[in-house]
Image (tube, coloured by chain):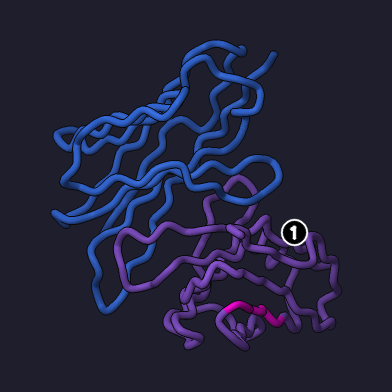
């Protein structure tokens, strides 16, 4: 069975600090996808990134960066120079290869990030 | 248009009421989802429709009844709910369903309170 662990329940930082959100996953599949979603107080989950299991290249998008390490089954997310607008719950999620005709997401429990001015 | 629109945003209902949640997308997506999210928990999948047909029902009680009238609309009919059903109900859509790498687009949800 697949599993996603986000050990950090809540993180508080002051604006402009860098912060890393951890994600560790378990799967028996060799083909899978990892995702990060952001859920601001308004409620909707916003897609941030998708990474497949064969692509270990790290990615940077503005102040966001992701570090995928297959050897440690981790897909960590770093926000550089955090801003108040980054305050949200962040979910890491795993999608395994299609089985029984479909594939669904397994979410971690989420990490609440609070950025204060 | 990259939005998933859900109505109403808030709903309070008694245990004997019948109400419906609505979800709409105009992105041409052929898969639509209902998720339930309790406070401080991750979303839990309830139903998936693929090409307007119910593909997944994650053992959801019959007091929740989904409906997909067309490729753009998804409803969730509620009847005889219990207080423990109070939660944020999220609708999502994706281009297709039977693919591992589908990116989901979520609505803002309906915050449901059952009294």
Which residue is found at the position 74% from the left and 83% from the top? B79
Which residue is found at the position 69% from the left and 64% from the top? B5
Residue A111 image position (x, y, % from top left):
51, 35
Q: Element type at marker 1? A: strand
| Quarter in which the N terminus of chain A is drawn | bottom left
Give the total of numbered labels: 1
| Highlighted magenta segment, given as a residue range | B72-77
Q: Can you identify the residue that label 1 sits on?
A: B111
Q: Is B50 placed left or right of A101 in the picture?
A: right
Colour assigned to chain B in the rendering is: purple
A27 in the magenta segment: no
Residue A84: quarter of image: top right
Residue B38 image position (x, y, % from top left):
63, 55
Relative to the observer, which residue lies in front, B89 or A109?
A: B89
Residue A62 image position (x, y, % from top left):
45, 25
Identify the chain drawn in blue. Answer: A
> Can you say whether A108 is above or below B15 in the image?
above
> Can you say whether A70 is above or below B86 in the image?
above
Q: Check the image and name the residue furthest to the front.
A: B1
Chain letter for the residue marked with disc 1 in the picture = B
| Quarter in which the C terminus of chain A is drawn | top right
Which residue is found at the position 79% from the left and 66% from the top? B8
* Magenta segment, prevailing SS (helix, strand or loop): strand
Q: Residues within 10 Å of mark 1 (few under 14, many from 20)?
A: many
Q: Is B71 placed left or right of B22 in the picture?
A: left
Residue A51: quarter of image: top left
Which residue is found at the position 59% from the left and 63% from the top? B36
Residue A74: quarter of image: top left
């Amino acid at each position: 069975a697949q599993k996603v662990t986000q050990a950090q329940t809540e993180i508080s930082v002051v604006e402009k600090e860098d912060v890393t959100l951890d994600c560790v996953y378990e799967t028996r599949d060799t083909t899978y996808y990892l995702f990060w979603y952001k859920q601001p107080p308004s409620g909707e989950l916003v897609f941030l990134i998708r990474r497949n299991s064969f692509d270990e290249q790290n990615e940077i998008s503005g102040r966001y960066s992701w570090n995928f390490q297959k050897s440690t089954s981790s897909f960590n997310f770093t926000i550089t120079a955090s801003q108040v607008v980054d305050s949200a719950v962040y979910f890491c999620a795993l999608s395994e290869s299609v089985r029984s005709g479909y594939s669904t997401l397994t979410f971690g429990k989420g990490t609440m990030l609070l950025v204060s001015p | 248009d990259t939005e998933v629109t859900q109505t109403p945003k808030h709903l309070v209902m008694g245990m004997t009421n019948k109400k419906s949640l609505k979800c709409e997308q105009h992105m041409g997506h052929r898969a639509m989802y209902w998720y339930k999210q309790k406070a401080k928990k991750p979303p839990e999948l309830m139903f998936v429709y693929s090409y307007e047909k119910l593909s997944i029902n994650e053992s959801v009680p019959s007091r929740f009844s989904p409906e997909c009238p067309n490729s753009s609309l998804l409803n969730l009919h509620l009847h005889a709910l219990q207080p423990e059903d109070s939660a944020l109900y999220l609708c999502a859509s994706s281009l297709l369903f039977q693919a591992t790498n589908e990116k989901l687009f979520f609505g803002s949800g309906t915050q449901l309170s059952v009294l």
